[in-house]
Image (cartoon, rainbow, N blue to C red):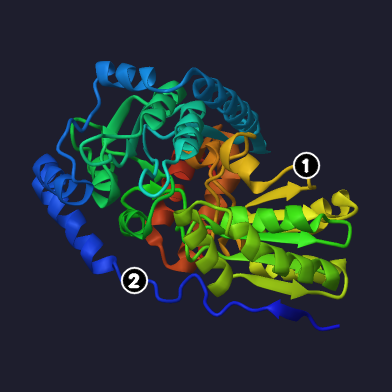
Amino acid sequence: MPIEYLKKADMTSETGAADVEDSVRAILDEIEAGGDAAALKYAKQFDKYDGNVVLTPDEIAAAADKVPQKLKDDIRFAHDNVRRFAEMQKSTILDKEIEVRPGLIAGQKSIPCQAAGCYAPGGRYSHVASAMMTVTTAKVAGCGHIAACSPPRPDIGVNPAIIYTADLCGADAILALGGVQGIAAMAFGLFGLPKADILVGPGNQFVAEAKRILYGRVGIDMFAGPTDSLIIADGSADPHIVAWDLVGQAEHGYNSPVWLVTDDRALAENVIALVPDLIATLPDTNAQNATAAWRDYAEVILCGDREEMAATADRYAPEHLTVQARDLDWWLGRLQCYGSLFLGEETTVAFGDKASGPNHVLPTSGAAKYSGGLSVHKFMKIVTWQRSTREGARPIAEATARISRLEGMEGHARTADIRLEKYFPEQDFDLSAAE
């Protein structure tokens, strides 16, 4: 049967998106030219903050004193999970070599970036977990210097829990700086920082645009849009849990899509009926976000069978993909396009967002078709090397000379010729272009 939309979105994540490129580019240009003073100007304008930008050890210690011990214990628990998962990932990157041909040895090795810049949002929500996910992963990867940056509240500063988390996870510098000016400070090496080789972490559309513009000069984790989540559920799922999982992700923002894909009409109709009442129980701001996201961006899709459900999920390629259905191993083997997968009722996106270990910086807007989330691999370069004996170089040089002449690249060919002449002066080689 063809899929049926029991609820269809009126908008997409791109609908009504502000054109911020020109303004962000102008701010970046001004800060690059004006340095620290220009960044401080924008901090005062946008953050409404004129306190110390690079936090001192005393300020970091004072922030830690403000964090309740129970919250410190929770942060340490989550940090340990994130660190252990990142260490597992790093163990999969091996320095290897192979004798490609007799006498010709080639290999790969991994080298961490020297400097990483990690952004942790602190506006509508203070993302302690984002500081944890980015700084911890950069630290495990072995980055030489890690800067953490988060927007301060007017006359208050950065949330103490973010400061505590960034310090715990290994940040070498913590900046009270938000938005484009924070990204610029890390990218351009302001306030005594080294210039970042890579910028990571979620943020609003201005932060995302700044990273997009700077990409190429620096590496970035990904081009990020509004967070999105999809739930696959069959008749065995608990509609109350499904509904809450949709609501929990819709509260991210007014344009955060959530989708339900199911083969059970009764479940779908039950969830549709439950969601508005659940949203109404949230605090005001959260409820406003979730109401708009559910009204304008949410979809409920009825499919004929599980293969059709899986194909639909792959087509959406969600950032977060939850399966609350029978035979979880089948789904794990079949599904192909997602940022992170949550199998079974016993796990949920919020677990991954906060504490379970796998990174929560994930591809959005369908990018999961070709990209995964943030990992130690993003902070590491996989480089190659080669060496050869003279005998090993001989067939490589012959092939290189002929291929180069076929391509019209005579200079390339002669770098091969000269080695053959030196190493095998008594030999006569046919190095003309292959016909």
Q: Could you tell me which residue is drawn at 49 percent across and 30 percent down?
A: 136
**Relative side of 350 to 217, left or right:** right
Residue position for label 1 = 346
Secondary element type, mark 1: loop
Where residue 411 appears, as percent x and y from the top left, is 37, 56
Report the residue that reaches farthest toward the bottom. 2
Within 10 Å of disc 2 (Cα), the crowding (few <14, some 14-19, many 20+) is few
Secondary element type, mark 2: loop
Residue 103 in sight here: no
Q: Could you tell me which residue is drawn at 39 percent across and 51 percent down?
A: 203
Residue 364, above or below 268 = above
Residue 398 in sight here: yes
Q: Do the residues labelled 2 and 1 touch (CB within 8 Å)?
A: no
User: Nearest the camera: 211 or 131?
Assistant: 131
Dot 2 or dot 1, earlier in sequence: 2
Q: Which amino acid does label 2 sit on?
A: Ala
User: Nearest the camera: 392 or 308?
Assistant: 308
Where residue 363 appears, as percent x and y from the top left, is 55, 55
Residue 6: name its quadrant: bottom right
Q: Could you tell me which residue is drawn at 81 percent across and 54 percent down?
A: 238
**Relative side of 380 to 218, left or right:** right
Residue position for label 2 = 18
Residue 418, above or below 88 = below
